[in-house]
Amino acid sequence: MKKLLSAALVSVLAALSLAGCGGQAGENAPAAGGQSSAAPDEELKFKVSITVSESDTWGVAAKKWAEDLEKKSNGRIKLKIYPNESLSNGNQPKGIEAVQNGSTEISLHSTIIYSVLDPKFSVPSLPWLIPDYEQADKAMNGVGGEKLKELVRSKGIEPLAFGESGYRQITNSKKAIVTPEDLNGLKIRTPSMEMMVDTFKAFGADPTVMNFAEVFTSLQQGVIDGQENPLPIILNSKLYEVQNQLTIWNYMYDPIIFGMNKKLYDSLDPETQKLIRETAEEAAQYQKELNRKQDAEVLTKLKEHGMQVTELTPEQIKAFQEKVKPVIEKYEGIVGKELLDAFRN
């Protein structure tokens, strides 16, 4: 009898704990759990956290997702977008933790930030591992993407779709970067990703881990010399105001995960799950198309804002690739050759 009472008490406490995971949307979101607990006609309200501004392709796609989901659910499912990592005070890893614990229901986060949870998330972004968008689509829609989804689920988050920040370029306020030697001693901001720190150390730079929310001011004050990001983020964050050199080198592909708290997702009825996933996939595809279309337009705008643009040739890039061979070898040992090959082949 005591064992039965103890088991019942544990169940009650667990239920109370899960009921408190929904944050501000907890009253309208279904309780997290393994069984469906939301009626198909119940109104649902979810918070969606994104790292960047609403004018970035992430933000535009999130808005489309919210509009499509509300329309297709006849107003039953509503998403509220929180840009600029506002729910986590600019701390991107904390933003992912919030989705894991359910205080934020949904987020759009780069795999670069997910690598804080597990270095295996670094794989798609290993330097020059995925050289172009054709290879990116093949990898993310194939075995590599499936392995990545399994990894996301193991962290308590359901992967709904993959978007992309695209290819990351480098800016600085000192000089044009044409050779690895040009990076010697430059203080380059990186996200909290060990692989990126290793990469810039291999180039001879001084990598400085920093939340993105602090980057503009740090560049303005000379705390750091440069940073790396996809072109739309460089433009929309107005980094051209504090950086005058831009090098196009496509050194790193940057996927985005449309992720939802897994316990919450599992608690939804199959029809609602399908609707959320399908609209997420449509928004992600729209985001990728928009991102790729914008690259040339954004580069033109950055030039108009006075940035000096250096576009590296394949021969020039080979010198950088030679420098990072030890980084690739190191991470093959960490994540395993099988996972690496899923993205490489």
Image (tube, rainbow, N blue to C red):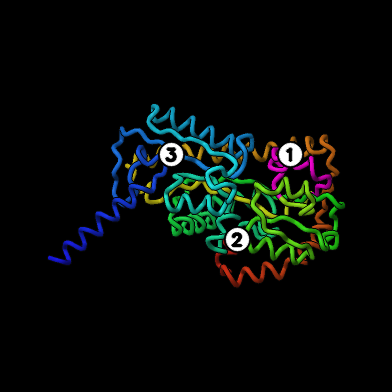
- Residue beneath disc 3: 46
Front position in the image: 207 or 109:
207
Q: Is residue 289 visible?
A: no
Front position in the image: 91 or 228:
91
- Residue beneath disc 1: 238
Q: CA distance from mark 2 to mark 1?
A: 29 Å
Relative to 329, is 42 on the left or the right?
left
Relative to 151, is 227 on the left or the right?
right
The x, y position of residue 45, in whole percent, is 41, 36
Question: Which of the two discs, 3 and 2, sits closer to the camera?
Answer: 3
Q: Amino acid at mark 3?
A: Phe
Question: Which quadrant would residue 233 be assigned to in this image?
Answer: top right
Q: Amino acid at mark 1?
A: Lys
The x, y position of residue 65, in whole percent, is 50, 35
Q: Secondary structure at mark 2?
A: helix
Q: Which is more N-terminal, label 1 or label 2?
A: 2
69 w.r.t. 95: above or below: above
Crowding at dot 2, Cα within 10 Å, few <14 / some 14-19 / many 20+, comes out as many
Front position in the image: 42 or 121:
42
Residue occupying image coordinates x 21% and y 62%: 7
Residue occupying image coordinates x 72% and y 45%: 216
The x, y position of residue 143, in whole percent, is 52, 57
The x, y position of residue 227, in whole percent, is 74, 52
Relative to 189, is 5 on the left or the right?
left
Question: Which of the two discs, 2 and 1, sits closer to the camera?
Answer: 1
Q: Which residues are magenta?
A: 229-247
- Residue beneath disc 2: 123
Determine if the magenta segment contains residue 71: no
Q: Secondary structure at mark 1?
A: loop
